[in-house]
């Protein structure tokens, strides 16, 4: 404590923002974009990997969501609901307008082979050298491993491991059972692990 | 499990399905103790878990791109246009 009195202005909660959106109060859309724009843009970038696609996802999501938010009954569901609109925009962007994979990937396909080298190839992220080139290269490998995932798995990985949504929030956003979210997250992680292991081998 | 445990049997396959829940702290205490016990005896599963943990940590540590200010302005302008035309 430095003894300085700090006045912290409390940010209005979703409840208050939703009321202002319903009234179409002046500045409500601006406030909506300020509060959620960064998060939705980052989500679009992580899923699509392209700036132009992320821009379209952001614009489509915010404009569509703002119009429909007036009918949202539960303000506490606002975040999951926004991710649902954004996820649909992402999947449409990739011309994969569905959350269902063509087939579920079996665990057996992701089990390491008996004769495979058991040594860990993936570098420990907490022990990476402070070298910009090494870090950029690591980032590119991880980005590619995420980008190579089938969309139905990638969307769950992005929401859970990158956006830090809870399993329940992901289930609500994607209209999936909790068990399906867990199953797809596990397979997505196993696929990323496999690609990274192979890229470092 | 004996010290002669050979990796790749049904125990390893059953464990393989639970690794994400284990990493996320979502297993009940009995299942969690089962994973820990297995890891003590099975080096391959231990190494596999560590490689999975690293992969998840790499994904989680990816930076979040910032929203470019001009993009925010574009969206506000697009919204203003839709209001004018409605």
Image: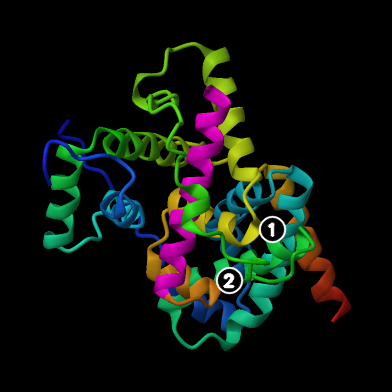
* Chain ID, mark 2: A
Vertical relation: B73 (above or below) A87: above
Q: Residues within 10 Å of mark 2 (few under 14, many from 20)?
A: many
Can residue B34 be seen from the camera position used here?
yes
Q: Is disc 1 surrounded by few (<14), some (14 to 19) or many (20+) residues within 10 Å?
A: many
x and y percent of residue A34 in the render?
Answer: 57, 56
Circles 2 and 1 in contact, beta carbons < 8 Å: no
Mark 2 vs mark 1: in front: 2
Q: Residue furthest right?
A: B85
Where does residue A193 sit, x and y in percent of width and height?
Answer: 48, 39
Q: Which residues are magenta?
A: A178-201
Provide the chain ID for the residue under circle 1.
Answer: A
Question: Magenta stretch: dominant SS?
Answer: helix
Task: Count numbered badges in the picture.
Answer: 2
Residue A84: image tag: 2
| The C terminus of chain B, quarter of image | bottom right
Q: Position of residue B85 (x, y in %)?
A: 88, 77
For the residue pair B81 and A179, the one nearer the viewer reads as A179
Q: Name the element at disc 2.
A: helix
Residue displayed at 65% across by 58% down: A151
- Element carrying mark 1: helix
Q: Position of residue B30 (x, y in %)?
A: 12, 61
Mark 2 and mark 1: Cα distance apart in space: 13 Å
- Which residue in the structure is indicated by mark 1? A58
Displayed quadrant of residue A148: top right
Is residue A128 left or right of A46 when viewed as pictured? left
């Amino acid at each position: 404590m430095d003894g300085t009195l700090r006045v912290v202005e409390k940010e209005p909660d979703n409840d208050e923002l939703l009321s202002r959106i319903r009234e179409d109060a002046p500045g409500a859309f601006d406030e909506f974009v300020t509060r959620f724009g960064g998060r939705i843009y980052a989500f679009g970038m992580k899923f699509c990997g392209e700036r132009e696609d992320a821009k379209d996802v952001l614009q489509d999501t915010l404009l569509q969501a703002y119009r429909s938010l007036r009918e949202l009954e539960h303000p506490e569901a606002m975040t999951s609901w926004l991710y649902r609109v954004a996820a649909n925009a992402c999947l449409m962007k990739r011309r994969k307008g569905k959350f269902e994979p063509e087939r579920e990937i079996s665990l057996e396909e992701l089990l390491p082979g008996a004769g495979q080298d058991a040594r860990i190839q993936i570098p420990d992220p907490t022990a990476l050298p402070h070298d910009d080139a090494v870090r950029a290269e690591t980032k590119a490998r991880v980005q590619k491993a995420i980008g190579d995932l089938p969309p139905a798995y990638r969307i769950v990985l992005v929401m859970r491991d990158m956006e830090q949504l809870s399993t329940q929030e992901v289930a609500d956003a994607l209209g999936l059972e909790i068990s399906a979210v867990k199953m797809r997250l596990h397979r997505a992680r196993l696929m990323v692990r496999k690609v990274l292991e192979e890229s470092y081998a | 499990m004996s010290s002669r445990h050979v990796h790749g049997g049904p125990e390893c396959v059953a464990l393989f399905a639970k690794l994400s829940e284990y990493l996320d702290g979502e297993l009940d205490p009995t299942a969690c103790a089962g994973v820990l016990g297995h890891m003590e005896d099975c080096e391959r599963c231990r190494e596999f878990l560590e490689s999975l943990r690293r992969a998840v940590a790499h994904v989680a540590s990816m930076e979040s791109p910032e929203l470019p200010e001009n993009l925010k302005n574009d969206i506000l302008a697009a919204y203003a246009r839709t209001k004018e035309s409605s």
